[in-house]
Amino acid sequence: MAMTPEAGTAVNETAADVTNSVPVASQDRMEPPRFLPSPGFAAWLAETGGSLLMSTYQSARLIFLYETDGGLHVLDRVVGTAMGLAVDTDKIWLGNKEQIWKFANTGPATLDSLPVDALYMPRKGYFIGPCDTHDMIANVDFKGERHELVFANTNFSCIAALDDQFNFRPLWKPDFISSLMAEDRCHLNGIGARDGRVVYATLCGRSDTTFGWRGTKNGGGFAVDVETGEILAQGLSMPHSPRWYRDRLWLLNSGDGQFGYVDGERGGFVAVAECPGFARGLSFVGDYAIVGLSQLRTNSFASGIALNAKLQAGNIQQRCGLQIVDLRTGHNAHWLTISGPVTELYDVVFNAGVRRPYCPGFRDPELHRQRVQLPDNSFPHPYRGVQQHFTKPPAGPEKSQG
């Protein structure tokens, strides 16, 4: 792993790890993304005691961010159309349009003479079909039943769980959706938990026709309590990322470029901060909200979105990256700008207690051969404690072919 030369800059580590719909050759030809953090970003991240994960959707990357030696370190893995993320105590879940992957935290290790807190290895893949998976929640209850993973099944307009036999197991759909069909009728993209239960969802429109939500990008979105069916806030523009934090439901009013919360007493959405980009992905740590920003696409997706006109009127340059909002003031405390092939983020997650993560992705064959994790039981084995690994074979005599 490369180390950061100085504070205020970011080291970028890339690998042509790929699965699903992104051709390997195309990824190999792409330039690596560039990361420009604000002067205090790395120090702030160090103070949190954890690290960040981001998914980049169109450029198919899973990105780990952490502080080391006073600067920001970036670990970049290509894994397919990366969208929803969920972090559990011992694993990371990653969703894309047709698949969901589970990466197991195999514990601390020494990698190329450098210590890592958590080494995430791919363990299992679910091929769920054309679900266009968005938000995901790990280890959560729905109506009294525990699920290893629940996800927003956007193309089928429902909330679903994993199933070993079927593509997915439907758990909830809006009352106006007449049939589960792969037609993205209402763009159900966001789900949120409260007290270990799936409670919240965000939808971009109240439609029961194929892509019907696209006609109501401005003002047709809403947030709903899936346990009661109550509409918690409406008149939203393409809302995303409902998150319960400090006794409030927070979300991103993406089409209007706003971060805020739902007023539980008066109803409606209260904007706290303006976003210089299309906001998707929301996480919290302490007094701060971590907001993911994307540039608007140069196609019909951006047409009719209020954010587009707002940014142009204010002569505000669109940004891809992170916006760190101080919840006490509503002001931006720190930021991270990403340029190059990455123009969109989908999700951002804070990984508490893991300061220095590592993941080989789907390649790095040497590490996949070396890393062994076994359960503790009556069978003796030497694979306990911190193991020494190398991303490349150590120099030595060639093995016999006999």
Image (cartoon, rainbow, N blue to C red):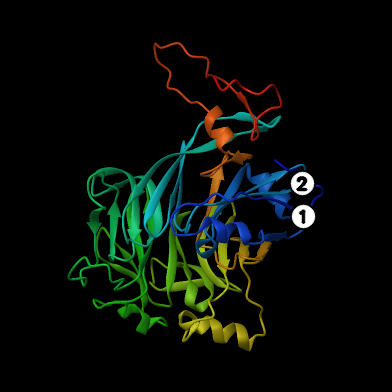
Instruction: State the residue in front, 51 or 366.
Output: 366
Question: What residue type is disc 2 on?
Answer: Thr
To which residue does mark 1 refer? Answer: 9
Relative side of 207 to 56, left or right: left
Badge 1: residue crowd in 10 Å (few <14, some 14–19, many ≥20): some
- Can residue 158 be seen? yes
Instruction: State the residue in front, 65 or 139.
Output: 65
Which residue is depicted at the point 61% across and 29% down? 109
Residue 72 at x, y percent in the picture: 71, 50
Relative side of 39 to 330, left or right: right
Check residue 4 in the rendering and tell me which mark sits there, or answer none. 2
Instruction: State the residue in front, 46 or 308.
Output: 308
Residue 36 at x, y percent in the picture: 72, 61
Residue 256 at x, y percent in the picture: 50, 78
Which residue is depicted at the point 17% across and 71% down? 178
Could you tell me if the residues under marks 1 and 2 are in contact, i.e. CB atoms within 8 Å? yes
From this view, report whether residue 241 is shown above or below residue 387. Answer: below
Quadrant the N terminus occupies: top right
Residue 242 at x, y percent in the picture: 42, 62
From this view, report whether residue 138 is shown above or below residue 300. Answer: above
Return the residue found at the far right: 6
Disc 1, SS: loop
From this view, report whether residue 292 is shown above or below residue 79. Answer: below
